[in-house]
Every structure is written in C-alpha cells, then in structure tokens.
Amino acid sequence: MTLADSPPTVAAATLPPLALTEWRNLPAEQQPRWPDASRAARVQDQLALAPALTAPADVRRLASGLAHAGAGRAFLLQAGDCAEPVGAAGLAAVRGKHRVIGRMAEIISGRTRLPAITVGRLAGQYAKPRSRPEETVDGLTLPVYRGDLVNGHAADPAARVPDPRRMLTGYATARAVLNELHLIAHESASALLPPDGSYTTGGAGLPTRAWDGSLRSILKDYGQTATHRDGTWRHTGLWTSHEALVLDYEQALVRRDGHTGEDYLLSTHLPWIGERTRRLDGAHVAFLARLANPVACKIGPGTGPEALTALCARLDPHRRPGRLTLIGRFGAGRVRAELPALVEAVRAAGHDVLWVCDPMHGNTVTTATGVKTRHMSAVLDEITGFFEAMHRADAWPGGVHLEIAGGDVTECLGTGGPAREDGLGRAYRTLCDPRLNDDQALLAASAVSELIAKG
Ligand code: PEP
Ligand code: CO
C-alpha cells in the first residue's frame, strides 16, 4: 500500500452513477417520510460533497477477511448496539465496545487458534426498521422511533417528526467514531513499537510512513486478532457495519473508486440488508446489488430455499467468496429444522457464502409489563443449534452477530444478568432491542469458542 493507492474523493458532480439510482423506481420499505422534501434533497447534496467515511482499500481488506471466514480459516465476530446513538453518547460508547469485542475475540482465538475478524455495529447503525408505525410510551401514543438518523427517541410528538438534518448529525458522529477507532488503533500500534515511536509497514530499514488514509497501513492485522511473539492473541481494531436502511443517506455516500472504476458505499465497510427490507424486487436489494462492498443479508424463519437462492443470485451474481454473508436469525426453536436445507440450496446454486448466526432477533420476548427482553438460555441455545445445523449440512459455521452494550446493562435475562423480570429496570438503557452486558457477551464468546473447538 502506498499513498498512490489511496482512493481520490470523487467530485459530487459526477455522482450518482446512473445504475446506482435504479432503486428509486422500486418499492422501498421503511423509508422516512421527510416533511420537507427539498430540505432532504439539500442534505443529500451536502453529504454527496462530504469526504467518504471509509476507504475502498479497507473495504477490500475486510472482504478478503470474510472470504477467509467463509472458508473456515477465520471466524467473524460482529457486535454492537441495536440502535447506536448519535452525538456525544455515540462517541462515548466506542471504547467500551472496542474493549469487550476485543476480549471476546481473544477468547475465541485463544481457544480455537483461528483469527477473529472483528466488526462493530458501529459508526452508522442509526436507523431502525419497525414492525408498527406507532408505539405507546407511558400511555402516550406516538409515531414510532426509527433511529437517531430519522427522529428522536424522547417520548414527545415533536421529537418523533422525521428531520433530514439528522442525516448530517449521523454522518458527523460516524466520522468522529471512525476517528476514535483510528486513534485506538494508533495507540495499540504504538504499544508494539520501538520507543522512538516510528513504524514501517514494509520491513527493517524502510523509512517511517505517513498515514495513507487506510486503516490497513496503521496495523497489518487491523480488524482481526493476531498472535503476539509470545503466542498470546491481541486484538487491533474494528471494521464498521450497519443496516443500510435509509437509502437517501446511503446513496449520498456512494463513491466511485478511481482505481478500479467500481462503486463503493463508503458510509461503512460492511452494509447489510435487514429481514424486513430484503424483498427481491425491492429497492434495498437493487441498491446493494450494485455495490462493490461485501454485503450481508439477514435471513429469518420461513425463508424458503428458492427465495434464498434468488436473493443470492441478485447479491452474489459472480459467486465471489467474501462477497455475501448470510446472517440467520431463526429463533432457538427453528434454527435446527430450517437452516440445513438453506445451506444445501445455497451451496448447490454455487454460492460460496459466509454463514453467520444472529441469536438475538429471533428470540425477543416482551414481559407482562411491556419490556422487551431476551433470555440468555435462548441466545445460547440458538448458537448451539446453529453449530449443529451447520455440521449437519457439512458446512462451516463462520461467525456470530450479537447485540452488545459494551457496559453493565440489565436488558437480557439469565446468566450474567438479572434472574427475574423485575431486575430489568436497574440499567435498562437500550434505544431499541435488549443487548448483552459484558459478562453475557463474554459468556457467549466462551460458548462459541467451545463449539468451534469441539468441531
Ligand atoms: C437488527 O439487526 O437490529 C434488526 C432489526 O434485525 P433484523 O433485520 O434481523 O430483524
Ligand atoms: Co436489533
């Protein structure tokens, strides 16, 4: 990697590439209804002129890590908030997430000897698909909260009005979060450096290099665990991912890579399509299909093999390892029965995908008093069922996707958290779905490491 490899920022006048706007004629679920369309258009113009948040070289680097994970040579650990806050709260949460994901990754790598590819639900996880347009909070019925990119979480009708300027706040926070991740990476790099602080990316005798705009150059092993000289595992950084839901925001952050001529979504490294927006004829699938990024897609219960292979054909037409990650979120009661046939169908269609388990979204329950929670027993059972199903289909269980707080919250019940529902209120802080606290996250990582090691 040299300075010459780093991508130029493409002038907004050349954007958007024609093919990338095809989605505008297709049904787009879960989009905000901005009250003032001209203001939304002005915000998009501003975003299209703003610097990209990620670099194509890094996106390609992650894609290669995902290809390794798909082939059984690495394991994907993807985790973070259900709904990430924008502003100071979002920035303040980064180090907690980095720390706990790093510890989880070291548990997995220490036990299995496989590198863990670490990806945060970070720096853009600001928009939420919702099942209902309204919700009732303390007796007040309000338009539902759709994530900080769209409206405010406060139980106040004025806060719930979609405001396109929130896309600028989201962009600014994502930029600050990425900057914080770069700083953390620099700190870890300097801990490994000679006392004069210089570093080279080549070898002994080469001059110190200036940062070339890619995370790759800060640390060779950025975004994955790697072994120290003494054989212990260290963790160096996080790639970013989010659900690419609000297409006005995402479209404005597409940039053409001047070197390869490909179009990248540079709001993140790894965008995914959610369970509610993955319809084959829909805008989200059309939009992600045209991007050069690796892409992920959630797969819920009831997904048939034909529907899934049709989706794979759209999202991975060239059948490229590392391109497509399928994140199953079936629920503990259904994963064993439903997953093996899907794995076989996808393989028979010639796609070399990375299979990942999301043991959170199929296991959400609501208590009698209306609090959303998840039982650790169900989360661990779905992870176990995922490994069993993958073994049955003779395929590699390549990763997990978790909602974690990076702190001491009381949102999920059972081991490591409150034993009873009346304990949930003590530190229930999520903006959307219930997350694992640190103890529960580490427990999940240990369970995963044992299942991998068992083979
Ligand atoms: C999520 O990941 O927060 C989410 C909404 O997931 P899904 O699309 O699987 O329901
Ligand atoms: Co969620």
Image: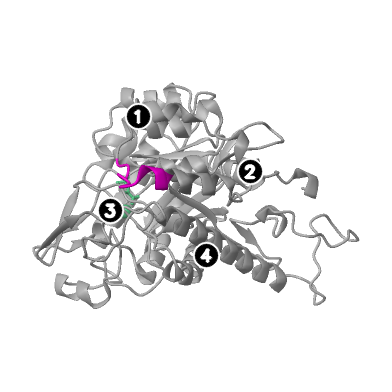
Task: Pinpoint residue 417: horizontal percent, then vertical percent.
Answer: 27, 72
Name the amino acid, label 4: Gly
Q: Is residue 409 left or right of residue 224?
A: left
| Callout in the foreground (2, 3) | 2
Q: Is residue 415 above or below residue 271?
A: below
User: Is tag 2's residue or tag 1's residue first in the polypeptide sequence?
Assistant: 2
Q: Which mark is residue 381?
A: 3
| Callout in the foreground (2, 4) | 2
Q: Which residue is mark 2?
A: 56
Name the amino acid, label 3: Asp
User: Is tag 1's residue or tag 4's residue first in the polypeptide sequence?
Assistant: 4
Magenta residues?
30-40
Q: Which residue is mark 4?
A: 102
Q: Residue at x 32, y 63 (%)?
A: 435
User: Is tag 1's residue or tag 3's residue first in the polypeptide sequence?
Assistant: 1
The front one of 12 and 204 is: 12
Name the amino acid, label 1: Gly
Q: Is residue 422 left or right of residue 290?
A: left
Residue 145 visible in the snapshot: yes
Q: Residue at x 63, y 57 (%)?
A: 222
